[in-house]
Amino acid sequence: MPQVGQGILKGMGITLKHLFGKKITRMYPEYKRDLPERSRGMLTVDMDRCIACLQCMRICPDHCISIEQTKRDADGSGKPKPYAIGFVIDDSRCMYCSLCVEVCPVNCIYHTEEFEAQAYNRLELARQFGERPVDPTIDPKPPVKKKPKKAAASADGDAPKRAPKKVPPKKAPKEGAAA
Amino acid sequence: MLSEERRVEESALTQPASGRLANPDVRDEFGLETLDMNMGPQHPAMHGLLRLILELDGETVVRCDPVMGYLHRCQEKIAENRMYPAVIPLTDRLDYFANMHNEHGYVLAVEDVLGVEVPPRAEYIRVLMCELMRLASHIPSVGFLMLELGAFTPILYSFRERERIQSIFEAVTGARMMFHYIRIGGVKADLPEDIPQKIWDYVETLEANFQRDFVDLIQGNEIFISRTRGVGKMTQEKALEMGVTGPALRCTGVDFDIRRDYPYSIYPELEFDVITDTAGDVEASYRVRIAECLQSIRLIKQCLEKMPEGEVLGDTGRRIRPAEGEGFGRVESPRGEYAVHVVSDGTDTPYRVHYRDPSFCNMQLLQEVVPGHYLPDIMPIMGLVDPVSGGWDK
Ligand code: SF4
Ligand code: SF4
């Protein structure tokens, strides 16, 4: 049995050593550390380059991007092209997952270094980028499920529509539920 | 020392819990009734949002029923309505102390059903990140265990290390906690140029400081020993019966580790030991965690040395739409076996995603182990199980 008190004294010695060491804490609002290059902060969009392809809106899992699309001949070529007249990013829903950034074909939506998103009202966090404000509370349509063709062709009326073939019978939905 | 008299009653180890719980009216020799008490869900020492319904006989716990569900977010149901890649950021929110492992398990399951080839460099980066994550989880769990015993210093040291690891993660993935880094078919992006050197330097300094800050500080401390030795004692059979995994199982002496027994990724190419201990109490789980940290350091160094050059993201096509079937992925998360079962019906979205989270499965240990202990011993036992709120409630 070790002599009682020895372990505690040893621990105290280590703590004391740290007391006179270099400080590792920093006072946050006064001191801000440099963020790494890849750091993901609040989103921003460069409206001049956006081609209104709506891919970011479709992929966003939280439906936080809403785009109002029109046709406009912006570059004077005589052919009207899709144009994002309204563009809103609702930061109160965004989870900074970066899916929209990766999917954008012209890299015009990107993360900034800003991360201090605070407001008194949720709607203040919806940031408008287009000429015309869009209501951020209206959900854009969720992604449409495309059924594979062979599933639609099955004439089996009893089988539940989305039941996969290979699942063991225990995990498949009950037959009685569909009948 | 104290450990002798605090040993759990023999009946608590041998009788099934249901028998003890079925006894509605436990009276002592004076005919006094027991007292029901709620611990949590908002309790300063509780790990997240957990409510324990305790039945106390004096200061001895007679019955302990954990009540979960205060953080339930329907993760599995939400996953059914999202496209395969969009589920990955959700898995980050499961066990928020083992985000990389969550992503890795889900991605392994989807890759299983999709049948996609993962480039070797991506596998090395995945394992490197997972082992860093294990360090960032085991070190704070030791700190939390000490915090629950009333020592405040170790938690500061452990969070200092965790913050440093998180800074590495931020440079690599862009976020400090919710990484969304491991993707179906590889990882999101290659490591930044200076990062391998930074990780190496960090791991070297950690190895040098580890003995001083976490072993010398705690091990041999009389208060620590008297509060943990013999507390939460569990037999091997009981641990196996309950399906406990991770350090809580290994501290009873069962030699089981998914990384070695059901190898995935590149673990067969790496050298590491599976740490076991024989005591099966809280102190043993502390020793297992400490030794596993050193093994993680060893794995990180091997990964950095062996890492091949090349691609980091395999070709999965523009749309991820697996054929009908099911996939399974299991990884060794810091808390035990984390497994994901994905069932595909041939559409863009999974038909079913099921997570087997170690926090949830290890939690049943409380019902079996806590009865017979004193009330203040519950917190060290929670440190043994080390559950995470996001994990058990999903
Ligand atoms: S970062 Fe993610 S959640 Fe935020 S807008 Fe982009 S896709 Fe949506
Ligand atoms: S993906 Fe890019 S180009 Fe397309 S609508 Fe979004 S921001 Fe505009």
Image (spheres, rainbow, N blue to C red):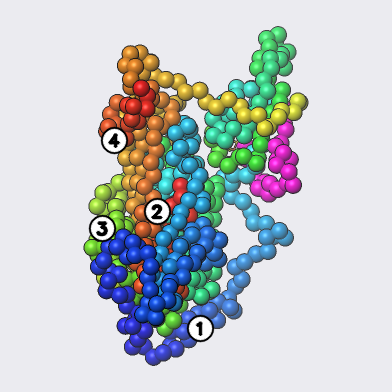
Q: What numbered label is drawn on residue B241?
A: 3
Q: Which residues are magenta?
A: A108-130
How far apart are the two marked residues, 1 and 3, measured between alpha carbons? 44 Å
Q: Measured from the top left, where is residue B324 in percent x and y? A: 33, 27
In the image: residue B333, left or right of residue B172 = left
- Per the image, label 3 sits on a secondary structure element best described as helix
Q: Measured from the top left, where is residue B243 in percent x and y? A: 29, 55
Above or below residue A150? Residue A39 is: below
How far apart are the two marked residues, 4 and 1, measured between alpha carbons? 60 Å
Which amino acid lies under the numbered mark 3 shown in the image of this protein?
Glu
How far apart are the two marked residues, 2 and 1, measured between alpha carbons? 39 Å
Within 10 Å of disc 3 (Cα), the crowding (few <14, some 14-19, many 20+) is few
Above or below residue B292? Residue B279 is: below
Tags 4 and 3 touching, CB below 8 Å: no
How far apart are the two marked residues, 4 and 3, measured between alpha carbons? 24 Å
Front-most of A55 and B49? B49
Q: Measured from the top left, where is residue A99 in percent x and y? A: 54, 35
| Rendered residue at 49%/47% (across/down) | B72
Which amino acid lies under the numbered mark 4 shown in the image of this protein?
Lys
- Per the image, label 4 sits on a secondary structure element best described as loop
- Per the image, label 1 sits on a secondary structure element best described as helix
Specify whether residue A128 is painted magenta: yes
Ligand 1 quadrant assignment: top right
Q: What numbered label is drawn on residue A170?
A: 4
Which amino acid lies under the numbered mark 1 shown in the image of this protein?
Gly
Question: Would you say the beta carbon of the disc 3 residue lies within 8 angstroms of ligand 1?
Answer: no
- Per the image, label 2 sits on a secondary structure element best described as helix
Name the residue tied to disc 1. Answer: A13
Name the residue tied to disc 2. Answer: B360
Which numbered mark, 4 or 1, is in the foreground of this view? 4
